[in-house]
Image (tube, rainbow, N blue to C red):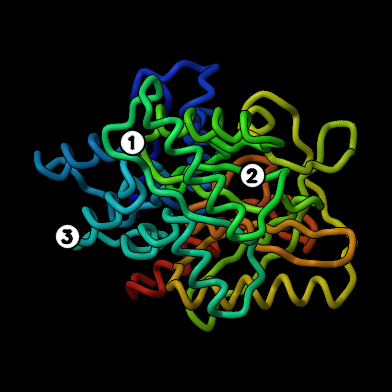
Amino acid sequence: MKLGITYDLREDYGIERDSHVFADFCHPDEIGYMAEAVRRLGYNPVKLGNMYQLNERIKSGTFDCDLVLVCDEGIKSRNREAIVPALLELNHIPYIGSDAYCMGLSQNKYHTKLVAKNLGIDCPDGIFFPYCEGWDADSNMERKMISEVIARLGESGLKYPLVVKPNEEGYSMGVFLVKDDEELKQAITFNFDNYKEAVLIEEYIRGKELYAPMIGSDDRAYVLGIGICRYEDGSDIDIFSLDDKCFKVIRDEIPDLGRDTEKKIKDNSLLLYRHMGCRDFGRCDYKLTEDGRVVLIEMNPRPGLTEGGPYENCARAVGKTYDEVLGEIIDSARERYQLM
């Protein structure tokens, strides 16, 4: 069986290695590591490249894979993670991962948290501030914007420090911890200038950075384990910045959380995962405060399957290998399409 892999590389879009604006891409080593595992599992891996390369293969009639592992992210569109699933579905091509609706919903952080809160899952308090069409940071619009934001923050009771982030990006792109009005203005201006989309301004949650990777679909979905991200020196990560993810050594470990906290994280993760209709694999990210508050930061239905990353870290803790976990993810999709 031929198993195709879609992915984005920085060079596909002319993005520099040290860019602090766009960073949500695969690394060639990550794709190679994944492809070799696919080969060891008995499949013939085919590196398909990004959405444009996949589309050209389909249009030219040269696409010949039996199943596709969707790992690309796209760029500069709120639909960027939904395009490949929609394209594959349109052409009746089986694929591994969540569908276009789930990907589009999760891309909108504000809408995802509305869903999570409705399910009783604790999320940071915050406000949604829409992008100002015709934005020009050198005009009176900037002063008007910051005045509106400060007024809304006062109405909501939110106080500094606050976290500012773009509503539809990933990989900590555009995430800032701000301590006063001037830093708030700079953070919103950066996001409006670079992403041209709404921002979320949320309460700052001090705590440990946890994640819960999941495997499977529907009632067969389960939480592989719970991991924690720490700096190379073993200290806890408080705000997981783009700089941390791209330019620092991060350790993935298994924390000792206690039965109640572990159960809450697993229950909340599966509740949201199933409600959103995630398929085959996905990950919830949390902050755990000193007083035991478990706060959802993000739902990611297309997390990275990197070497030594969250999946391999949690797999190792339960006596599984990377290959075994990847095999379960592939098998989940094969069962859905009855390709067994």
Mark 1 or mark 2: name the one nearer the start of the chain. Answer: 1
Which quarter of the figure has residue 266?
A: bottom right
SS assignment at label 1? loop
Q: Residue at x 83, y 59 (%)?
A: 289
First along the sequence among labels 2 and 3:
3
Would residue 45 be visible to someone looking at this image? Answer: no
Q: Which residue is labeled 2 in the image?
A: 163
Which three-letter amino acid code belongs to the residue tagged 2?
A: Val
Q: Quadrant of the N terminus?
A: bottom left
Distance from the alpha carbon under mark 1 to that under mark 2 = 22 Å
Residue nearest the observer in this picture, 313 or 145? 145
Q: How far is the residue under mark 1 from the one under mark 3? A: 22 Å
Q: Residues within 10 Å of mark 2 (few under 14, many from 20)?
A: many
**Residue named by callout 3:** 90
CB under 8 Å between discs 1 and 2: no
- Residue 43 shows in this picture: yes
Residue type beneath disc 3:
Leu
Outermost residue on the left side: it is 60
Please rate how many residues cluster around mark 3, counting C-alpha atoms within 10 Å: few if below 14, some from 14 to 19, many from 20.
Answer: few
User: Type of residue at label 1?
Assistant: Lys
* Mark closest to the chain's N terminus, 1 or 3: 1
| Front one among 80 and 143 | 143
Give the CA separation, mark 2 to mark 3.
38 Å
Q: Which residue is mark 1?
A: 76
Residue 244 % position (x, y): 69, 31
Residue appearing at x 74%, y 56% in the figure: 287
Please provide percent x and percent y for residue 24.
48, 36
Q: On the picture, is 305 further left or further right than 86?
A: right
Q: Secondary structure at mark 2?
A: strand
Residue at 34 percent across and 63 percent down: it is 99
Judge depth for marks 2 and 3 and give the one in front.
Answer: 2
- Residue at horizontal 42 percent and vertical 53 percent from the top: 107
